[in-house]
Amino acid sequence: MKHNNSFSVEESFRRFYGQIFSALLYQFGPEWTTAIEDAIQNAFYKSLKSWKSEQFPADRGNWLFVVAKNDLINQIKRSNQTFEIQEIEESISTKEDQRLHFIFAITRIKSISQSARQLFILKNIFGLSVGELSLFTLQSEEAIYKSLNRTKQTLKVELKSSLHDENSNDYHGKIDLVEDVLHAVFNTSFDSFNPKMITTVNDDLCLDALALAKNLSTKYEKQSTRNLIALMCFHLARIPAKIVDGSLVSFFNQDRQLWDENLIQLGFQNLTKADQLDKYYLEALIVSKHMTAVHYDADHWYSIIGLYKLLYQLVNSPFILLNLAYCYHKAGNTEESHKMIEEIKEFFPEDHLYYSMIKIHIDSTKTEFDQKIMLNKILKNVDQEVRKGLIQSYFIDYRF
């Protein structure tokens, strides 16, 4: 797959941002957070000028790391401030585990809310944009910027001792928070809205989240982490069938022969029912039922509805209610689907893609002409060509 030069550079930037940020923050300290962000941005701009098409450095991550590190050192020297560093590394090849350590370190800071903590990690460790975070959280971009700045100020004061506490024993109590972060990374990457991509899946970031989840599972052997891995595997198995001949194919129209059987089996191997249900088990079970169903009849949809109701008891999310509205519609329960859409409209912006599409899909009172007008309004807010094609064909994807 060939991309233009600017996208290839951006792809590298997003892929290595978190490793570089974690390494520099660990070495120089959280008081230099803003300077670190600037240094990584400067390295990105230099790569745009230096990297030529088809002639990228052999190790793009280390190239960006060294340039950012040198830029940061120059910034600090110009500030005439003294600084201490843990060590000067010339490579980030061994920094993969440091991201988990960084995430755990932030979870120990009680003065930062879970929501703010997650936003900061997604932005700075995984390189997600504020626009992507806004779609994922339903928060405005302005609110996210404010949250990030507040968190940054708190971390400057409180992170240093937590970051270098290698012997902390409270990791087990924080694993669920780390799982939430990896789940969020995977979701936003599996359903990416990056207009420069020719697909809706950021493969590298999805696999990155899976690798970190496996690392987490190996270290702490928690059942919920294995269920998270199962969920990721079921989704990843369908990537070969999502884009066919340049067109985005909705889940229920995908060719099952293209699904990766090895990943499906790996998903079932990790799927583990515990005495106490966890949200990742339920999510993975929902996806697996869709993937193995022979008929999508009313009985199937009501079994899915039951699982979503259980999931909503664990996760109070409007996205679950949106999925429920669609499921009721597919089960033929028009009254319940309309009722649910009305109940959740206060949570979604009027132009939110999935809310708008499902609302059109289940609203039988609209004429075909009215539906086309509404679809045209939605299309104006969609930048990805491959996603536009799916909307124009009026095929609703049940956010899988």
Image (cartoon, grey):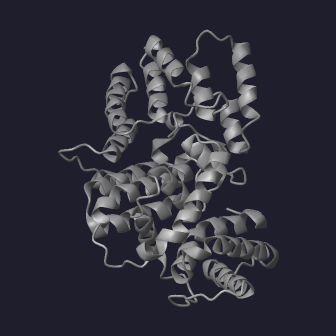
Q: Position of residue 374 (x, y in %)?
A: 71, 22
Taking 30 as reference, is 217 left or right? Answer: left
Front one among 20 and 212: 20
Q: Is residue 62 above or below residue 312?
A: below
Q: Could you tell me which residue is drawn at 37 percent across and 42 percent down?
A: 283
Q: Could you tell me which residue is drawn at 44 percent across and 52 percent down?
A: 114
Front one among 43 and 257: 43
Taking 329 as reference, is 285 left or right? Answer: left
Front one among 89 and 293: 89
Residue at the right extreme?
Answer: 49
Residue at the left extreme?
Answer: 275
Q: Position of residue 13 (x, y in %)?
A: 66, 68
Q: Position of residue 248 (x, y in %)?
A: 62, 42
Q: Position of residue 211 (x, y in %)?
A: 43, 66
Q: Is residue 321 above or below residue 25?
A: above
Q: Could you tell me which residue is drawn at 52 percent across and 21 percent down?
A: 341
Front one among 74 and 31: 31
Does any portion of residue 260 appear in the rendered image?
Answer: no
Where on the picture, by quarter, is residue 103? Answer: bottom left
Taking 170 as reference, is 320 left or right? Answer: right
